[in-house]
Amino acid sequence: MTMDQPELHSNISQVRERLSNAAKRANRPASDIRLIAVSKTKPFEAIRYAFAAGITDFGENYVAEGVEKRRLCSDLDITWHFLGPVQSNKTRHIAENFDWIHSIDRLKTASRLNAQRPVDKAPLNVCLQVNIPYEETKSGLTTTSELVELASAIQQLERLSLRGIMAIPPPCADPHLQREQFKLIASLLNTDGLPNHVDELSMGMSGDMEAAIAEGSTMVRIGTDIFGARYT
Ligand SMILES: *Cc1c(COP(=O)(O)O)cnc(C)c1O
């Protein structure tokens, strides 16, 4: 079921207000924080409504679904973010259709994306996914040495632009614990050997965006609180 347009507009206003309040509390300009609307499982009409409400960044987790929605919204000036796990046989579609990928944790997929990125497009923006603190069920780099090693290798790939770090810490309701987790993730940007220009932090979802912004997030990825619950 598609949410109606007034409801979506009101959700977006509320999320924007939360973002700007959190930025204010952290003494940060709200414009430093990119709001990515995570539209996975939602119909392309929802993307068109959200775009009409001023959202320009959309995140998708599944390649075929994301490519189809991009095609159906090709008249809109949207920045597309790929957030999901990457299978090697799907990299070409990502290289050809997305502007950012947040979920790189292997050189093999990075190399394929580099080779497949069309020459008429800007380099693909990349965030490295970290799984720190470690959780068995999640993908991502688990140590700072892995992080530095992959970052150095990706620096050599001309069709990729290494921009930052992405993390999905375990859901937790306690704002203090949320902040501790995000503080740890943010501190990874200062790892010795990581280039200084790598400064984007993709962290914060519907349940913890305030804590993420307090700890320096530059990109929050919001699904549920914009588009409603997902049933699939
Ligand atoms: C689904 C998803 C989100 C959005 O999560 P919500 O809790 O619905 O806001 C953000 N990031 C990633 C990587 C996701 O898969």
Image: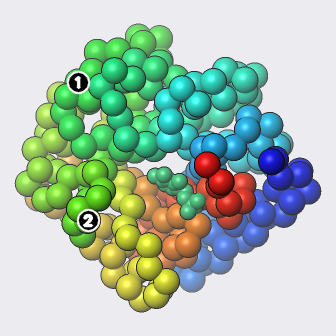
Q: Are marks 1 and 2 in contact (CB under 8 Å)?
A: no
In three-dimensional space, the C-alpha distance between marks 1 and 2, rounded to whole angstroms, equals 26 Å
Q: Which residue is mark 1?
A: 111
Indicate the position of residue 50 as horizontal and vertical percent values: 77, 46
Answer left or right for 41 relative to 120: right
Indicate the position of residue 230 as horizontal and vertical percent values: 65, 55
The residue located at (34%, 21%) in the rendering is 89
Q: In front of the other: label 1 or label 2?
A: 2
Identify the amino acid type marked 2: Glu
Q: Which residue is mark 2?
A: 135
- Mark 2 secondary-structure assignment: loop
Answer left or right for 230 relative to 54: left
Against 228, residue 128 (above or below) is above
- Please tell me which of labels 1 and 2 falls first in the chain: 1
Against 13, residue 177 (above or below) is below
Q: Nearer the viewer, residue 197 or 80?
A: 80
The residue located at (76%, 69%) in the rendering is 14
Residue 207 occupies quadrant = bottom right
Query: How crowded is the residue under tag 1: few (<14 C-alpha within 10 Å), some, or many (20+)?
Result: some
The residue located at (61%, 49%) in the rendering is 232
The residue located at (26%, 51%) in the rendering is 140
Answer left or right for 34 relative to 3: left
Residue 66 occupies quadrant = top right
Q: Residue furthest top?
A: 119
Q: Nearer the viewer, residue 133 or 138?
A: 138
Indicate the position of residue 133 as horizontal and vertical percent values: 24, 69
Identify the amino acid type marked 1: Ser
Camera sees residue 209: yes
Q: Residue furthest front?
A: 232
- Mark 1 secondary-structure assignment: helix
Indicate the position of residue 158 as horizontal and vertical percent values: 27, 22
Against 110, residue 133 (above or below) is below
